[in-house]
Image (cartoon, rainbow, N blue to C red):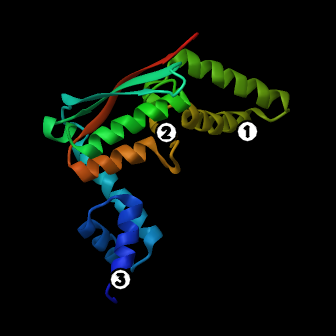
Amino acid sequence: MAEIAAATVKELRDRTNAGMMDCKKALSETNGDIEKAVAWLRQKGLAVAAKRAGRATSEGTIQTYIHSNNKLGVMVEVNSETDFVAKTDQFIQFAKDIAMHIAATNPVCITKEEMPQDVLEKEKDIYRNQALESGKPANIVEKMIEGRVEKYYKEVCLMEQPFVKDPNITIKDMLNDLIAKLGESITIRRYVRFQVGN
């Protein structure tokens, strides 16, 4: 295969923030196709994240976001394996971005697994009634409910939400990319969102 142009490597690096060597390898593996290289890097991030998943994350940072009107604020705890990683600019910026994102989207929970069952059942009942009222058969209704629930998760579960600054990636993608870059298990542990009058 022909040599990968430096400009192509730079473009991929700008888009993904991945290391120079990782970008070259991704482009080499995908015959210089930038879109495929982005997907290749994301898959690599997922693999690294899966390997790191079981590790304890007892270090970290607490970051805040206060909206300009001083009527909305978020405090978020993001954890890493070591204090060294917790002090990096990338890690701190990630935590700040998560706090700002939570202020904007007001998620119900961090992961699907943390979704309160009563909230989920209420949503399913609403979807079921809507589908039945439209005269759909029972077997189609259940499939419709599954699809609507997945859409609901994307709206209210932090990890499933598209990032407010870049809707092409989810919070889960951002987290996995950060894990791949920093080489440690990282978790969004908890958050609190305050809004005046609520």
Q: Residues within 10 Å of mark 2 (few under 14, many from 20)?
A: many
Mark 2 or 3, closer to the camera: 3
Residue on which disc 3 sits: 5
Identify the element where label 1 is drawn. Answer: helix
Looking at the image, is mark 3 or mark 1 earlier in the sequence? 3
Q: Residue at x 46, y 33 (%)?
A: 100
Residue on which disc 1 sits: 140
Identify the element where label 3 is drawn. Answer: loop
Residue at the extreme front: 69
Q: Label 3 is placed on what type of residue?
A: Ala
Residue 162 visible in the picture: yes
Picture coordinates of residue 50, whole percent (x, y): 28, 46
Q: Nearer the viewer, residue 2 or 19?
A: 19
Identify the element where label 2 is drawn. Answer: helix
Asked whether the beta carbons under mark 2 and mark 3 sit within 8 Å of each other, the answer is no
Residue 79's label in the rendered image is: none
Q: Residue at x 64, y 18 (%)?
A: 122
Q: Is residue 196 above or below residue 110?
A: above
Q: Label 2 is placed on what type of residue?
A: Glu
User: How many numbered discs sit on the rendered protein?
Assistant: 3
Mark 2 or 1, closer to the camera: 2
Residue at the extreme top: 197
Q: Nearer the viewer, residue 188 or 69?
A: 69
Residue on which disc 2 sits: 160
Picture coordinates of residue 63, whole percent (x, y): 33, 29
